[in-house]
Amino acid sequence: MSGNYIYNVRDYGAIGDGISDDTKAIQDTINAAQQNPYGGTVWLSGGRYLVSASLEITNSIEFRGNGQQTINGGTQIVPKTGNFTVIHAHDIQYGLVFSGFDIKRGVDPVAFDTGVGIHIQNVNVNTRITNVNVFNMAKGFYVDSSGGVVAENCKVRVNKWGWRVAHDSTGNSNATTLVDCSVDGMGEANGFVLANGYNSLNTTRCYASSCKYGFYSTKMEVDGITPGTIPMFYNIFFGGGEQCEQSIIFDDMGGVCQISQFFSLSGSSQKGAIVFGEDVKALITVTDSSISPGNGGIVVKSNHQSAYISINGGIIHGIGSDGLQVGGNAKINVNGLVISELLEHGGRKPSGIRILNNFTGIGSFVGVGQNNAYIGFEVDEDASGQIMISAGYFLINFAEGIVNNSNIQIMARGVNGIPDQG
């Protein structure tokens, strides 16, 4: 199989028995393929290839395995330790393909491990990753200042982060798309991280389980990297977080973000399943998404007048906290959200919607349905700003409908169970 621009690692001395060190043989194969002016395919037939140092890719090639658990045997790359980057592709103008292999250590990662499965750095455009999995490493995929990255059907099991998409170097930092990808965070890793000025991350049918933060945006320092600028666009379609401390948390965000048909299931804390932090400046739309028992609700903290958060449809059910908490200075519009069966937690009786002490913004709540919360709409003592509630705010089995203070202007119109006011 060495003709037709296909370079078989076994022709260069690889054994693939999981015992012999195949690092040099695989690197020699990569070097040969890179010398071909038309590019080449590095082929790893079925086997377990032990590597003890990073495999360096510096030109456009295809790096292909035999798949996972095929009739002829799957392809695994086995890192000897958990403290190095297994594949480092960098400083390439155009075109990389990875497909059909696992990177898998035989033992779980530990706290001091630092290894990365695949690091794509300063690759200008057009990287494709299909059916590539990273198991038992500290970190999975690191897209660093590289554009036009598309990954499909990739699974990760790590203890630091699954995907980090960031502008940590100097290259093109625009457009990574993930489809049908998943991260098992082993109870401590972050799942899908957009960081440090990278322009856009789009996820479709991607899932985070047992993560600290499932889907996370930040400009803050990670792994000694100096904080940069706010990331811009993070779109999450048809995805979910299960048994995460927080399913979605945007600490820093600009631009436009969409969250559609997302679910948060069986969370591990009451801090908020979906949280928009103080430095969010974006236009954010949350559509037809659901939060179920074991989670906190939706928390809005943004201090920026430029932030506009729209929540359309969806359901928050059976959680042990307030359904929706709103603070800061953002503009928020809620339309058609259903909040039901809130539970006491830590001795506190939750509210369907709670306006926090530091709220100074503008809120509109239209057609919000509620069932079985202690207070339907609660306004903390020091909150200010403007609130409008209208059209079908259904109150069933509530101790109180609206609890508010004199600092905030509330307009209620057409609300079932509450006299018109304002």
Image: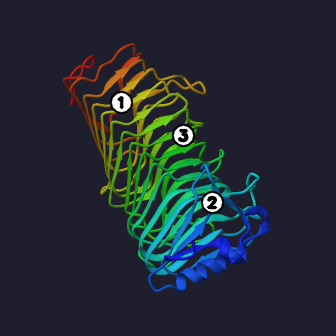
Q: What's the residue at 32%, 61% (across, down)? A: 255
Question: For the residues carrying marks 3 and 1, which lies nearer the camera in this image?
Answer: 3
Instruction: State how far apart marks 2 and 1 are (Cα).
Output: 47 Å
Q: Nearer the viewer, mark 3 or mark 2?
A: 2
Q: How many marks?
A: 3
Instruction: Answer with left or right where residue 211 lies relative to residue 354.
Output: right
Q: Which mark is residue 139?
A: 2
Determine the image quadrant of residue 336: top left
Secondary structure, mark 1, is loop
Quadrant that contains the C terminus: top left
**Label 3 belongs to which residue?**
271
The residue sitting at the top extreme is 397
Q: Name the foreground residue: 306 vs 171.
A: 171
The N terminus lies in which quarter of the figure?
bottom right
Q: Is residue 17 above or below residue 2?
A: above
Q: Amino acid at mark 1?
A: Asn
Residue 159 is situated, as x and y percent measured from the top left of the image, at 66, 53
Q: What residue sits 36% from the left and 58% below the top?
A: 281
- Labelled disc at residue 404: 1
Amino acid at dot 3: Lys
